[in-house]
Amino acid sequence: MKLLVTGGAGFIGSAVVRLAVAQGHAVVNLDALTYAACLENVADAAQHPDYVFEQADIRDRAALDRIFATHKPDAVMHLAAESHVDRSIDGPGDFIETNITGTYQMLEAARSYWMAQGKPDEFRFHHISTDEVFGSLGETGQFTETTPYDPRSPYSASKAASDHLVRAWAETYG
Ligand SMILES: NC(=O)c1ccc[n+]([C@@H]2O[C@H](COP(=O)([O-])OP(=O)(O)OC[C@H]3O[C@@H](n4cnc5c(N)ncnc54)[C@H](O)[C@@H]3O)[C@@H](O)[C@H]2O)c1
């Protein structure tokens, strides 16, 4: 399977890329290389012939269209995000732009590509959320997928918004 992984130079994304390559998947790693990126974390995977790196911003629709058309992925794993809560309190703008607008651009680029491919049933858009959309736990308790949304920071609000966009695109466009 060919995976388009966004944010594949990040903390979790780089582990996803390493695992996917080790399991025999072809990987296109799409990352803007912000302060949070570390390409060293995928240095071993980068030696693999089925690994490609694309430096691009998920807000850049033209770049996304080019990358989908060039690499023709079977599935997307969307991890690229502004992810640090403290930074979201100091400056929420980048979180709105990347996490909400960027996810919207990813959804539209994926939808356009999926339609051009004849709407294959097996295509998947896998969006990575965070437990923070459910708010804060006390000493005890747990979140489940049915816990009501209750974001408490600009970061978690932007992630919640992106979750709702992804759910809406799945319901609306299949
Ligand atoms: N780290 C955690 O504890 C945690 C917990 C739950 C969920 N998550 C979610 O998992 C995902 C990955 O988290 P992480 O900790 O690896 O994040 P990270 O901050 O380490 O990495 C994010 C990656 O996204 C890239 N990126 C940022 N903005 C971009 C843009 N506009 N276009 C393209 N690439 C961009 C960065 O360059 C970086 O490589 C995020 O969606 C995050 O919300 C993280």
Image (cartoon, grey):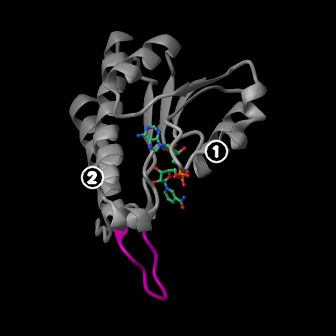
Counting from the top left corner in percent of width and height, residue 134 is at: 36, 68
Residue for point 35% across, 72% down: 135
Q: Is residue 130 above or below residue 24?
A: below
Circle on res. 143: none
* Residue at image mark 1: 38
Query: Can residue 141 be found in the magenta stretch?
Result: yes
Residue for point 58% across, 45% down: 37
Bin the neighbour count of mark 2 within 10 Å (Cα to Cα): few under 14, some 14-19, many 20 and up.
Answer: some
Counting from the top left corner in percent of width and height, residue 43 is at: 75, 35
Residue closest to the eye, 170 or 34: 34
Earlier along the polypeptide chain: callout 2 or callout 1? Answer: 1
Secondary structure at badge 2 equals helix
* Horizontal relation, residue 131 to residue 153: left or right: right
One can see residue 23 in this view: no
Counting from the top left corner in percent of width and height, residue 149 is at: 29, 65
Mark-to-mark CA distance, 2 and 1? 27 Å
* Residue at image mark 2: 161
Q: What segment is highlighted magenta in the picture?
A: 133-143
Q: Is residue 102 above or below residue 164?
A: above
CB at mark 1 closer than 8 A to ligand 1?
Answer: yes
Secondary structure at badge 1 equals loop
* Residue type, numbered disc 1: Cys
Q: Is residue 61 above or below residue 144?
A: above
